[in-house]
Amino acid sequence: MEDMLYLMNSLWVMVSAILVIFMIAGFIMLEAGSTRMKNAGHIAGKTAFTFGLASLVFWAVGFAFIFGGNANFFVGMTDFFYSGADLELGLSSTVFFVFQLAFAGIAITIALGGFAERAKLSVYVLFTILFSALVYPVVAHWIWGGGWLAEHGKQDFAGSTVVHLTGAMAALAATILLKPRIGRFNKDGSANAIHGHNQVFTSLGVLILWVGWFGFNAGSTVSVDAGFFGFVALNTQLAAGAGAVAALIISWVVLGKSDIPTILNGALAGLVAITASCAFVDTWAAVVIGLVAGVLVFYGAKLMEKLGIDDPIFALSVHGIPGIWGTLSTGFFATPELATVGQPGLFYGGGFAQLGVQAMGVFVSGAFAFVASFAILFIIKKLLGGLRVSEEEEIMGLDISEHGTYGYPEVFADTKSKAAAEK
């Protein structure tokens, strides 16, 4: 019986890992669709490449820093260049490794959203290596690897803080140092919309992410015992639906029209928010968490625009602000029966204790991710003589300036040929 449970756990987590890895395809579609056609090939290619690069870094040092023994305050110090050592987890250790690798890949993908349409490819490469080695593993160790926040009972079941807030704070550092894209803001501070080139791509990307999130959240049970992953999946779905509905309503009320990107971002915000709490709250609370996230994502995007922050992929308003709300939400809604980590929330007689732990975790993790990412990017800027492509290269698009080819050759190459022929 134990052997059968071991095999079933391993199979379930392996399937979940594949679902999380498939989320990279969702990010490719989402980011390419949300940006301009002249950068589509670059965005798709760098997303796939940086996931592969982050995987190598995670194998070499990332896993060891998170879960290794002989730990100091920041990281573990054993199991470098992981080769399948048995961790006695009730499932295959290599399957668990692949599952955790997938999460690390998602974190860097979120972070790189803040670089979109203006960063050099070399910056993507260097930042991927350093973020995957020095930023993400520290936060993950603190919360999931038995670090000091885990000792305080920090609740983050599948990564609202570890993955989403960490990635968003790195994206914030990038947007500040890179500065806005050409034409995004006027001299008086007013904003100009830079529309993505394909809402169908964006919608498909969101749907792929939505499906992949069941591996993200339900897979984090790392067990088939009692079918609890089904309850986690239900909470995940309810929050996503509520987020989409709330975003539709708030955009319709404020703008007079229901805005498609806002609706899509609302679904993602609901998913981000429920990621911390999906195993700790009742279904009604999952709906509330999603509804609040759907409103927050709308006003979060407005706030970023007002602050003059150019966030092309909405990394901050989708992953950052809802990530904070989702992490704090367990301090309100975690039930005594489901709070297997930490304490029940405020609304279930737990007082402010768990809410305080959640707030501390958000502040410390977010601050560390931002400061460390900012420092890494500042050093890269000095080493490379800048983070950003030239104005000419940005105007022509990163497809041709960084890679020498067009993502849509039948559009751009044919236009160029016709113009030459007319001359």
Image (cartoon, rainbow, N blue to C red):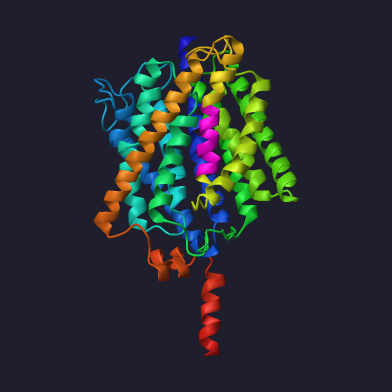
Residue 207 in view, yes or no: no
Residue 149 occupies which quadrant of the picture? top left
User: At 28% from the left edge and 52% from the top edge, which residue is drawn?
Assistant: 380
Foreground pick, 230 / 121: 121
| 317 is within the stretch colored magenta | yes
Q: Is residue 184 left or right of residue 111?
A: right
Residue 337 occupies which quadrant of the picture? top right
- What is the x, y in percent for residue 94? 38, 27
Farthest residue, direction front: 188
User: At 49% from the left edge and 51% from the top edge, which residue is drawn?
Assistant: 309
**What is the total number of numbered labels drawn onto the structure image?**
0
| 210 is within the stretch colored magenta | no
Farthest residue, direction bottom: 423
Above or below — where is 262 with respect to 139?
below
Foreground pick, 131 / 248: 248
Image: magenta residue range = 316-327
Above or below — where is 169 with respect to 354?
below
- What is the x, y in percent for residue 12? 52, 25
- What is the x, y in percent for residue 252? 74, 46
Query: Magenta: predominant secondary structure element?
Result: helix
Above or below — where is 90 with respect to 308?
above
User: At 46% from the left edge and 17% from the top edge, which residue is drawn?
Assistant: 6
- What is the x, y in percent for residue 36? 54, 61
Residue 343 in view, yes or no: yes
